[in-house]
Image (cartoon, helix red, strand yellow):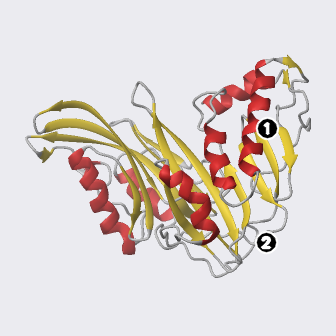
Amino acid sequence: MMIISMVMILGPLALTGCTRSAEPPSLPPDGVYDHDAAGENSRADPVPAGGTAGSVTRPLAAAGWFCAQVRANTDGRALWCRIGHRDQADTVHPQVAQFLLDHDDRLAWAWFPPAGQSAEDDQVAAAAAPALAAIWSGAGDRVRQEINDFDRDLRGRMAQRSDEIPRTVWRDTHADYRYSVIDGLVVTARESSVRRWPFGAEHYATMMSSAVADLRAGGYDCAYPPQQSCNRPQSNGYFRVSLRGDQIVSAWFGIGSRIESGRQRQPLSQEFPRGLTFLTEAVRRPVTERIEQSRRSGTGFAGIVAGTVVIIDARQSTVGGDSFAAYLDIQIGAPLAATLPV
């Protein structure tokens, strides 16, 4: 909602020294997913400690982010990092960072989307600057300077044509950079590129068309195709996916938990009577067990389970002895690089 609001607010604004093009480069870049499978590997792994991957993610991990190598193919590999910022109402605002490395372990592309809490926060710079500084000399300081200058000019509210979104671009010896409050920071390396971006998800996810019937059996209102977001009115639940064709790439859903005298009074089968059938048989049981562990304890989780990214944000609403109620927002898998939702 914050991103949509910013489009409306920022339309009339202008920034001194900013690029003024009504059509910025696309996300994702043209054609990067228009290819047949090229040795796709969708099993998530910890980020290697050495090399470029370890260098760019180490500052984020030290700040509490979860990072993983989420997919790879013949040409490159994709890294995905995430942290959840909690506000005073205990609402989690996720922030992510995405990296694409070529087959020679060089950074080819990176994206630091805004967290969506405030147009004036510095969370993009706080993430991007140390990550890029770890591999490119001077890049971190330049990122902070450019974003700070942009934000200062943005607060000046100078006039601009209403069909333009304020943004700024710059380049150095390492990369081209594009920043706006809508997209955040997009980094395109100058000496490295990946022609075919990895898109696999077959290790952990099934097809949406095969999952719809089971979702409906659990009380979800689903009309797929074309609907990619389903609601469950009985429990205020939701289920939404990102897709490549019919293939589920990532899934998000919300589910409650009610523990009374140490026993679960809201079984998973109420909403998923046939289990989590949007997951492959290879990962379904361990992922389900990890979710049930968080439902029993009312606690969150961010990690890799059976080669699958699992993110659980938990909010406890009542606590009394060994009884409590909680609501869990769960993400399975990471979206494709440069696609929404992040």
What's the residue at 91%, 24% (across, down)? Answer: 161
Seen in the image, is 17 located left or right of residue 119? right
Image quarter of residue 73:
bottom right
Q: Whole-Å distance between the Cαs marked 1 and 2?
A: 29 Å
Image coords of residue 23 (percent x, y): 88, 42
Disc number for residue 146: 1
Out of 124 and 8, give the one closest to the viewer: 124
Image quarter of residue 327:
top left
Above-or-below relation of 42 to 209: below
Above-or-below relation of 319 to 198: above
Amino acid beneath label 1: Glu
Q: Which badge, 1 or 2, comes first in the chain's sequence?
A: 1
Above-or-below relation of 217 to 86: below
Image coords of residue 243 (percent x, y): 59, 59
Q: Quick one: label 2, few (<14), some, or many (20+) residues within 10 Å?
A: some
Disc number for residue 195: 2
Amino acid beneath label 2: Arg
Image coords of residue 134 (percent x, y): 65, 57
Image coords of residue 153 (percent x, y): 81, 24
